[in-house]
Image: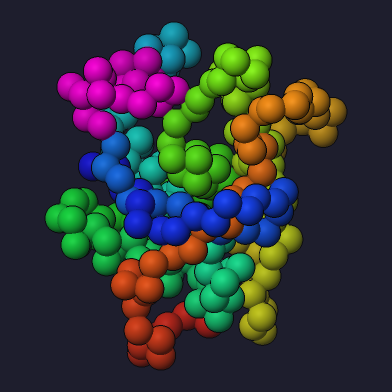
Amino acid sequence: MLLSLARCSTRTKATRHNDAPLPPTVSPSRSDASKRPAGALAYNDLSRIVKDGGARLDDLDQRWWGGTVMGELFKILFAFANHNPERASWEYSARIVEKYAATVKVSGARTSIMAAKRCFLTVAHLWGAYSIRGRKFRERVEVHYHYADDFESFLTEAEILRKWGQTWKADAAKAKSPLPAGTWAMPEIWTPRPRKPGWPPTGMIPDILLPHDLLPPPGRPGRPRRVR
């Protein structure tokens, strides 16, 4: 089951850096293709991409779940860093995902959440950007904004998150940046195509706030003091 904390409020303001996460909707199942929003990546399409890549994956469902959880973790961490920096840590963010998973009765045990974080850490910014944009791609043909343009915008959003994740540090002794040096990055020579008048506000990160009812009480014993 895919998580997305969809009750978060999204501000209309958008910037090209330092903002925060979206969320909860449950992703359409494989049988709900007719109801899938335009631009959402269909499960069958994902499966075909994997097959065409020559890799046999018998655990695609688990990988997709793990990547989605990684995206939610990164999104929540990013939100905390911008609005509640004293709570900005992977462990504290995992509590939010775990709490919501328990509320809606979907898979989301703490050990599984942290295992997903370890597995997908070097691509966390990609999953985070995908989660922030509602896990879908879009086009607006009336202003000549096509899926290819939106995908480039997605890559721009991911790069904003990567640069943040490799430079930001919590205000604590021996704090480390959330993303490691080996995080996947676009080639240095890559630049997104110039934006055109009327294009939607993509290629930037919206300011999104976590709902207070999803926040664990402050001062709970064992709250980590730095990103680990």
Q: Does the magenta stretch include residue 44?
A: yes
Q: Is residue 59 above or below residue 204?
A: above
- At a point 53% along the width and 69% down the height, the residue shown is 80
Residue nearest the viewer, comparing 228 with 9: 9
| Residue 125 image position (x, y, % from top left) | 58, 46
Q: Residue furthest right?
A: 189
Residue nearest the viewer, comparing 118 with 90: 90
Looking at the rendering, the stretch of residues picked out in magenta corresponds to 28-46
| Residue 217 image position (x, y, % from top left) | 35, 84
Q: Residue furthest left?
A: 105
Residue nearest the viewer, comparing 119 with 39: 39
Residue 182 shows in the view: no
Q: Residue furthest top?
A: 52
Place residue 220 in its image quadrant.
bottom left
Residue nearest the viewer, comparing 144 with 50: 144
Question: In the image, is 124 to the left or to the right of 1?
Answer: right
Number of numbered markers: 0
| Residue 89 image position (x, y, % from top left) | 51, 70
Residue 160 shows in the view: yes
